[in-house]
Amino acid sequence: MEDLPFGGHTCGVDEAEALSHAPDALRTALSLVMERGLDIPTPSPEPTGTLPLVCLPSLVDEAKVELYRILRASGLAKTELARRMGISKQQAERLLDLDHTSRMEQLELAFRAIGKRLAWEVRDAA
C-alpha cells in the first residue's frame, strides 16, 4: 500500500491477523483515492522475500479499479461512459464505486463501451 498517496494501515493481535485485514485496508485506501478523483499509481512489482502481496478482496473490485484507471488515463468522463452504455450517469458512477455492488456483466459492458475487453487469468497461489 506504499504506492498509494494515503497509504493504508491494518492491525491485529499478531501479524497473521493484521494481514487478514490487509485486503480490506487496500480496498478502503483505493476507494478514497477514487472518491477524490486522484490517479492510482501502477503497483510496484510483486515482492520477493519477506514482504507479503496484498490483493483486492474480489475480481469485481479489481475490475472497477482498472476501469477507473483507464477512464482517468483517457480523459473520458463518466457522462460519456454512461452515454455509450445507454445508462444514467448515476449508474456509471456506481460502476466506479467500490462500496456499491456491481455485477461482472455490467463491468464487461463498460469495458466494451470504451473499446476494451475484460479478461481474467488463474495463477499459482503464492
Image: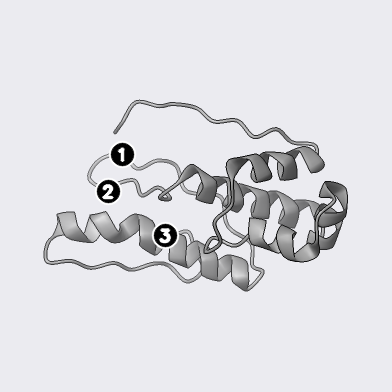
Coordinates of residue 75 in the picture (x, y in percent)? 81, 57
Q: What residue type is disc 3 on?
A: Leu
Coordinates of residue 67 in the picture (x, y in percent)? 66, 49
Occupied quadrant, residue 10: bottom left
The label number, if any, that marks residue 51 in the structure image:
2
**Relative horizontal placement of residue 88, taking residue 44 as reference (left or right):** right
Crowdedness near tag 3: few (<14), some (14–19) or many (≥20) residues, C-alpha within 10 Å: many
Coordinates of residue 66 in the picture (x, y in percent)? 61, 48
**Relative horizontal placement of residue 70, taking residue 57 as reference (left or right):** right
**Relative horizontal placement of residue 64, taking residue 79 as reference (left or right):** left
Crowdedness near tag 2: few (<14), some (14–19) or many (≥20) residues, C-alpha within 10 Å: few
Crowdedness near tag 1: few (<14), some (14–19) or many (≥20) residues, C-alpha within 10 Å: few
The residue positioned 47% from the left and 71% from the top of the image is: 6
Q: Is residue 49 above or below residue 87?
A: above
Q: What residue type is disc 1 on?
A: Thr
Occupied quadrant, residue 89: bottom right
The label number, if any, that marks residue 28 in the structure image:
none
Q: Secondary structure at mark 3?
A: helix
Q: Nearer the viewer, residue 8 or 93?
A: 93
- Closer to the observer: label 2 or label 3? 3
Coordinates of residue 12 in the picture (x, y in percent)? 18, 66
Disc 3 target residue? 26
Q: Secondary structure at mark 2?
A: loop
Whether the residues at callouts 3 and 1 have beta carbons within 8 Å, the answer is no
Of pointers 2 and 3, the one earlier in the residue sequence? 3
Disc 1 target residue? 48
Q: Nearer the viewer, residue 88 or 68?
A: 88
**Relative horizontal placement of residue 36, taking residue 101 as reference (left or right):** right
Give the CA distance from mark 1 to mark 2: 7 Å
Give the CA distance from mark 3 to mark 1: 19 Å
Q: What residue type is disc 2 on?
A: Leu
Whether the residues at callouts 1 and 2 have beta carbons within 8 Å, the answer is yes
